[in-house]
Amino acid sequence: MRKILAVAIVAGVAALFIWVFRAARQGEAAEKQAEVVKIPPRVRRTPAGDAVVTLDAQAQARAGLKTEALAATTLPQEIQAFGDLQEDPSQSFTLRAPVAGTLRRAKTRDWPDLGQTLADGSVVGTIEPRLAPVDRVNLTERLTSARAEVAATSASLVASRAALVRARTLNAQDKNVSDRALQEAEARVKGEEARLGAAAESARLIESALATAAPVALSVARGGQVVEVLAQPDEAVESGQPILRVARFNQFIARVDVPAGQPVPGFVSSAQIVPIGHEERLLRGERVSLAAAVDPKTQGQPFLFRIRDPGLNLRPGMALTAHLNLPGAPRRGAVIPRSALVRFAGAAWVYVQSGAGEFSRREVALDWPVEKGWFSASLKPGELVVVAGAQTLLSEELKFQIQVGEEEAKH
């Protein structure tokens, strides 16, 4: 009887435990079901299959949603071409050994290294001349040439200064000479002065080398960033051998290859240049000339444009897109602000307000940059686009797609 009573008690306790456990589970399920709040769907599909996100005023305020009306604009007929940046030869300087000898470090500084910036006239080291009889004859010939260069440049400088005086006089007299012609005359004078200074310095150095075997200072006439170091201290160098090269990156040459078979008018004098990674900046390129050779890969007409003072961290070799103006009536469209763009699935999109609290996503092409954004012919001026909070709308749309996918999977 005791065993039977013990078994009965254990069975009763087990049954009570199971009943309590089931009751607790049912209570938790009831509480969770009670906590579920039915939220009306924020996304619907149009008959065409496009998604429309709906947000009330409170939800828009929480998301920081802001809209802006598209401004009207016009864009000239253009052709799009591609190319790359090249170093402007006028902005580089190669330091060469004035005499044969051995390179030595300067007493007050280390030997220049790649990436270092040198000022105009910086002394980077010295060279101990090595003057054999043949070298002395060679230096004498070079000195004669340098003095002739000084004389010729001096005569040319006198003529250029006279031309500049005439240009200034005529420019002041009712613009009988254009401002551009005056600037070119000033540039010629500066160029001749630079040539004269370089020739005089070269003659002085050669004279010094002939007069004494004392070390000759190596100085950079035009400063810039060191891009090549072609010799090191304690190395023997020959006369005229390059030692280092510096360059300035405040001016570039843009080589642009027009697609093969695309005619370009000969009067094209400028282009809008957009370096890769700097789509927010439009740089003006002034035509220099046609390139000396056609790219065998593209077989298109090659142009060279000069970009002055871009103010960006650009370097030779960077890819670019160029827009060359063509004759014809300008195109009409709207300006898409950069803040309105949303990147998704490898494309660019904007959200357009299609009704009260309703926003639909539209794909846009980013082929034609303008000063304040991108030109679009598919959107109309006056349409309201979301310029703040567009990412929230995309999140709502993606959540809706996930929910629809889960429901379809259940069925």
Image (spheres, rainbow, N blue to C red):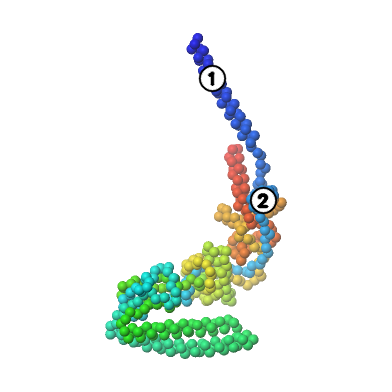
The residue positioned farthest toward the left in the image shown: 133
Q: Is residue 356 left or right of residue 32?
A: right
The residue that mark 1 highlights is 13
Q: Residue at x 63, y 36 (%)?
A: 35
The reply to whether residue 221 is in sight is: yes
Please rate how many residues cluster around mark 2, counting C-alpha atoms within 10 Å: few if below 14, some from 14 to 19, many from 20: few
Q: Residue at x 60, y 29 (%)?
A: 26
Q: Residue at x 59, y 43 (%)?
A: 405
Q: Amino acid at mark 1?
A: Val
Q: Based on the displayed image, in which of its 4 quarters is residue 262 positioned? A: bottom right
The reply to whether residue 363 is in sight is: no
Q: Residue at x 57, y 53 (%)?
A: 344
Q: In front: 85, or 210? A: 210
The residue that mark 2 highlights is 61
* Residue 337 position in % (x across, y down): 63, 61
Give the vertical position of 17 relative to 161 (above or below).
above
Q: In front: 145, or 105? A: 105
Q: Is residue 136 left or right of residue 60?
A: left
Q: Amino acid at mark 2?
A: Ala
The residue positioned farthest toward the front in the image shown: 108
Count the labels in the image. 2
Give the vertical position of 86 relative to 174 (above or below).
above
Q: Which mark is residue 30?
A: none
Element carrying mark 1: helix
Q: Based on the displayed image, in which of its 4 quarters is residue 13 positioned? A: top right
The residue positioned farthest toward the top in the image shown: 1
* Residue 9 position in % (x across, y down): 53, 16
